Image (cartoon, coloured by chain):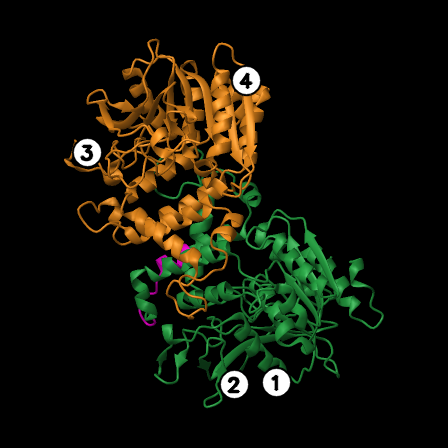
Chain colours: A green, B orange
Amino acid sequence: MITQDEGSVGIVETEYITFAAPPNEMQLECGRTLGPIALAYETYGTMNADKSNCILICHAFTGDAHAAGRNHPDDPKPGWWDNMVGPGKALDTNKYFIICSNIIGGCKGSTGPGSIDPSTGEAYGLNFPMITISDMVNAQKVLIDYMGIKKLLCVVGGSMGGMQVLQWTVSYPEMVRLAIPIATTARQSPQAIAFDAVGRHAIMVDPNWNNGNYYGNPVPSGGLGIARMIGHITYLSDKSMHAKFGRNLQDKTEPEYDFVTEFQVESYLHYQGDSFVKRFDANSYLYITKAMDYFDLAQPSGELKRELARAKAAFLVVSFSSDWLFPPYMSKEIVSALRRNNVDVSYAEIQSDYGHDAFLLEVESLSRLIVNFLEYATPRGEDADEY
Amino acid sequence: MITQDEGSVGIVETEYITFAAPPNEMQLECGRTLGPIALAYETYGTMNADKSNCILICHAFTGDAHAAGRNHPDDPKPGWWDNMVGPGKALDTNKYFIICSNIIGGCKGSTGPGSIDPSTGEAYGLNFPMITISDMVNAQKVLIDYMGIKKLLCVVGGSMGGMQVLQWTVSYPEMVRLAIPIATTARQSPQAIAFDAVGRHAIMVDPNWNNGNYYGNPVPSGGLGIARMIGHITYLSDKSMHAKFGRNLQDKTEPEYDFVTEFQVESYLHYQGDSFVKRFDANSYLYITKAMDYFDLAQPSGELKRELARAKAAFLVVSFSSDWLFPPYMSKEIVSALRRNNVDVSYAEIQSDYGHDAFLLEVESLSRLIVNFLEYATPRGEDADEY
């Protein structure tokens, strides 16, 4: 066992690059361009001489570049994947140079709808162009090029991070040696689109939203809170909710028969909604959910096998048994398409009651799989099918 | 096959009884009283001489007393369970006298939060007392007494209607010969509470809600629409959404990369939300979801078997394989408790991709089960275990 101090990367600083300054804006999938673009990122560990030990972490929907360590000694919590990234951990900073890049469209230091539009001097708001998973990856590619990395040892990520992993393998097949898409899908399901659509609707009917022009004014916290509450239901499982809350009342044993929060699960959701609105921008919520909803790696042919044929990486695909947002069948669809392309692919369905959140919680099982898979990449690598 | 005209009960009229006029108000589970109470109901078929052919239908959350036929010749649609109720149908009006009673707390003709509070002359709003499934059943019991029915041949209903069926069997065990709870649960799950909680939250943060005092003013249609959209996601299944919408765009083949409705599933949800706010009262949404959330037939002992021991009816319990709001395991929990009490219980899990909505859509399978079960109640009834 590694204690927190032993396994921590320590104090880290978020870094930034800026690129695509006009007139060299980045071309986006929607047909529009974006620039200048700032990208926030963090790195952990040391790049080796031939730059062959570089691992890129792609974060999930509301994540950020701060995957490990602390930005300040008095930070109450470490980065979002701290239990996976550090000396002696699965993504071992004694061996690997780890990069976590933020996404464009978000609100965590990279250019997004809350950034200043240089053409107006005001926040973009809804003038921000629509971005896709492919655009996010193209921006990250600029960062990897800037670092002089020709080929990433591995690209890894869960949920929307897994979408980026998959996109990397087909957008830049020569640049990815190993790919680890976790708890994700090759195409957003209609049910996931539906949940996203309700979240967006909740934001857009909030009077404070004001067609996206709320910067400097009260934000659409009601709508954003609702969107987050819906999201949290999809991150847990029926079983984990039974275990975590059951039908327990909040701070009482008998119902009071009123419309104040009664059940623990209600209290949990209200808390999650309230705390989220303090740290996330409603317009980013709109843009990023749309990016996920547009994600369909089977396009344009409609055939996933065909579109994944460009991928040259070896894959470790991981799903979690109780994840109903991106259920195991979606991972199996990826695995099946890759296998029919004779790609080297390992698949693991981790038994877990944690639902979609398992990709952040099942540290031990996930670490074992990732450690083994990364060792496979060494010259005396074993056959991936053994894992 | 029965054509619509052959199988219809024809033109029906919604009827009303009023009872519990002060000072004889009805005692409610929450400790408060309610009166006077109006209850809307419809009947189909003819009561026989000894009143032994009476079947009570309990409707689901947003349903009403209008289960079959049309109230006006030019009604575009018949009642909500018309495919199950009529001459020659599963609930055969040639044989049975069918009653469908509305619930209290709703907005479909029975007393609810939108009714006038006689003590103020204004709509109750949040002064309406909290009601429970047990209170709904107690009000229906007054109607059944009023009709002079000593024992119902059968009580049947799906979803929240199924909760009422279960409640009937323990509240009035001597009055129920056969019970058919469909797609339901003996206790609302934390996941279902969570979805309800978000719906309520969406209504209550809508500025138009105004602490429930919106009658005569613009209603909280934004919040109520969101609540309904969430509900609809839980009524469908992942698979039925794939079949019904897939990732198809609405009225176009290429995305336009904007925040106008893009996907068919979004359009469907927006439509459902918009049409719902025209026919349902937001305060009723709050009260009825709370009634479902409080529903826990295992209380007060915490042991379902023990609490169900009062039931004397023979049961047909029906679930649907893809129903994830009230999944089959919840029906099996009921069946298991009843069997351990040596109650006569049949159980069927109908294979269906329709999700929770299956209880309204799987007419053929459901009809076959119900017809057989009802015949079992005749003197030469066969063993229920055969079905």
Q: Please tell me whether mark 3 sits on a helix, a strand or a loop.
A: strand
Give the alpha-carbon distance from disc 1 to disc 3, as whole Å. Answer: 71 Å
Residue drawn at 69 percent across, 82 percent down: A150
Quarter of the image that includes the C terminus of chain B: top right
**Residue A69 visible, this orientation:** no
Mark 2 = which residue? A19
Mark 4 or 2: the one toward you? 4
Provide the chain ID for the residue under circle 4: B
Q: Is residue A225 magenta?
A: yes
Q: Which mark is residue A233?
A: none
Q: In which quarter of the view is residue B13 placed?
A: top left
Mark 3 or 4: the one toward you? 4
Give the alpha-carbon distance from disc 2 to disc 3, as whole Å. Answer: 65 Å
Residue drawn at 41 percent across, 34 percent down: B160
Asked if labels 1 and 2 touch by Cβ distance under 8 angstroms, the answer is yes
Q: Please tell me whether mark 2 sits on a helix, a strand or a loop.
A: strand
Q: Please tell me whether mark 4 sits on a helix, a strand or a loop.
A: loop
Residue B163 left/right relative to B20: right
| Residue furthest to the left | B121
Mark 4 = which residue? B343
Estimate the x, y position of residue A65 in percent, counting from the top left: 56, 71
Provide the chain ID for the residue under circle 2: A
Q: Amino acid at mark 1?
A: Tyr
Give the alpha-carbon distance from disc 3 to disc 4, as whole Å. Answer: 43 Å
Q: Which mark is residue A146?
A: 1
Q: Amino acid at mark 4?
A: Val
Q: Which residues are magenta?
A: A215-227
Q: Residues within 10 Å of mark 2 (few under 14, many from 20)?
A: some
